Image (cartoon, grey):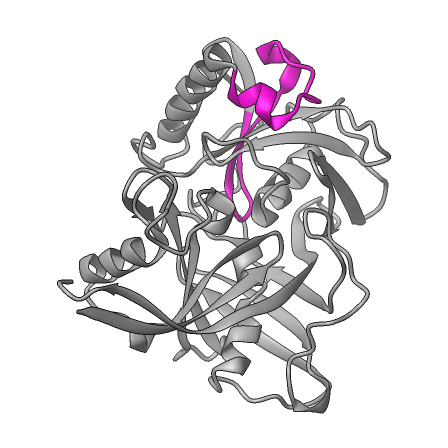
């Protein structure tokens, strides 16, 4: 016998995952996680589940109406850690967040009010908030459009993500070590958390040029071992504890831009090289670029003014982060452009013995 759970599969930004209503899953966390592991797959190929054997396609959104005055829905992100038979709810995911508004409308959780619908999302993982601006002509979500984002073929309708109060999402402060520049195992790093805990490292300090392919970086075992050693020590300094079994902090190698952007990146999530860059990871990297004395200072080409569009180059293109600063240089708001598409509706089946 098999047991079924209603869900939708949605592409959010450059990721995709399964979206559930919280009420349709077990309330006990351990039972809920067992359902999600069976739904997406427990082995590295995820042959017995709907995951795509990649961190970008092994994600889950759990959505419910919010009881908060400043939010319409609550969103819990769950990362199924491919091949390790476990989940991690430590980080946020800004890509999967881009599909939360569509899911809330498709399920009837929220009503469409006009040709443009604004949805206030409370991100349960970190306690941060984001406003999604959806295109909803004729009373339904518009998925087709002319907006293109790198890492996704074709074009779609825009989803504007306006992030609020991101600093210290997981670590409690923008610079969790108290420093803009730290030395870890003889390497200069910037440990930063503006929506996602990230360790920013100049690629050349690890013997790389920063323009390598993901495959070349992933097959360099000595490099990966050193990167992981730095990550584990950085996690302790960033007040994240033992991160050996966590997907944060992310690691981001940076180098001078070479395709017209402001910084070039190669990011790890945390052990696989990202084919692009995560939404909130890009925000943290872009924020590091504007901090005097950070490892990005002198590498990034930062535009002038209090409103900065930072183009973050990555292996499959670029990601533009809009930063609005106050006169003291503090980031007030962050704006990002994403797209989303509903892929399927139905039920996912797991073993009835659960």
Check the image and report above or below for 64 versus 313.
Answer: below
Indicate whether residue 125 is drawn in magenta. no
Check the image and report above or below for 2 versus 312.
Answer: below
**What residue do we see at 53% from left, 56% from top?**
16
**What residue do we see at 66% from left, 55% from top?**
332
**What residue do we see at 39% from left, 70% from top?**
20
Question: Picture coordinates of residue 56 (x, y %)?
Answer: 51, 47
Q: Is residue 207 visible?
A: yes
Indicate whether residue 204 is drawn in magenta. yes
Give the side of residue 210 with respect to residue 200, left or right. Answer: right
Q: Is residue 181 visible?
A: no
Q: Nearer the viewer, residue 254 or 181?
A: 254
- Image quarter for residue 317? top right
Q: Nearer the viewer, residue 130 or 136?
A: 136
Question: Picture coordinates of residue 180 (x, y %)?
Answer: 58, 28
- Image quarter for residue 312? top right
Q: Nearer the viewer, residue 276 or 203?
A: 276
Q: Which residues are magenta?
A: 190-219
Give the side of residue 88 with respect to residue 330, left or right. Answer: left
Question: Picture coordinates of residue 152 (x, y %)?
Answer: 68, 52
């Amino acid at each position: 016998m098999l047991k079924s759970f209603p869900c939708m599969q949605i592409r959010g930004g450059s990721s995709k995952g399964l979206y559930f209503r919280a009420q349709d899953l077990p309330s006990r966390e351990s039972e809920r996680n067992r359902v999600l592991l069976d739904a997406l797959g427990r082995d590295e190929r995820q042959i017995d589940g709907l995951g795509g054997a990649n961190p970008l396609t092994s994600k889950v959104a759990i959505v419910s109406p919010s009881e908060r005055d400043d939010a319409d829905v609550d969103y819990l992100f769950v990362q199924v850690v491919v091949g390790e038979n476990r989940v991690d709810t430590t980080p946020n995911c800004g890509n999967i967040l881009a599909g939360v508004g569509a899911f809330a409308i498709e399920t009837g959780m929220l009503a469409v009010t006009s040709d443009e619908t604004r949805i206030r999302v409370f991100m349960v993982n970190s306690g941060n908030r984001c406003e999604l601006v959806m295109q909803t002509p004729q009373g339904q979500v518009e998925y087709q459009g002319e907006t293109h984002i790198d890492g996704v073929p074709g074009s779609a309708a825009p989803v504007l993500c306006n992030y609020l109060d991101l600093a210290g999402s997981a670590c409690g402060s923008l610079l969790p070590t108290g420093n803009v520049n730290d030395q870890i195992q003889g390497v200069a790093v910037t440990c930063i958390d503006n929506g996602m805990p990230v360790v920013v490292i100049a690629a050349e300090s690890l013997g790389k040029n920063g323009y390598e392919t993901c495959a070349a970086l992933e097959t360099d075992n000595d490099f990966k071992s050193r990167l992981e050693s730095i990550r584990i020590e950085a996690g302790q300094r960033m007040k994240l504890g033992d991160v050996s079994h966590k997907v944060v902090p992310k690691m981001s190698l940076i180098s001078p831009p070479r395709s017209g952007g402001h910084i070039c990146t190669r990011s790890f999530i945390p052990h696989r090289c990202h084919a692009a860059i995560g939404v909130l990871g890009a925000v943290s990297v872009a924020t590091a670029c504007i901090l005097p004395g950070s490892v990005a200072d002198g590498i990034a080409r930062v535009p002038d003014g209090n409103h900065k569009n930072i183009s973050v180059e990555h292996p499959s293109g670029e990601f533009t982060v809009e930063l609005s600063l106050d006169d003291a240089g503090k980031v007030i708001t962050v704006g990002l452009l994403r797209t989303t598409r509903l892929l399927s509706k139905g039920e996912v089946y797991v073993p009835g013995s659960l």
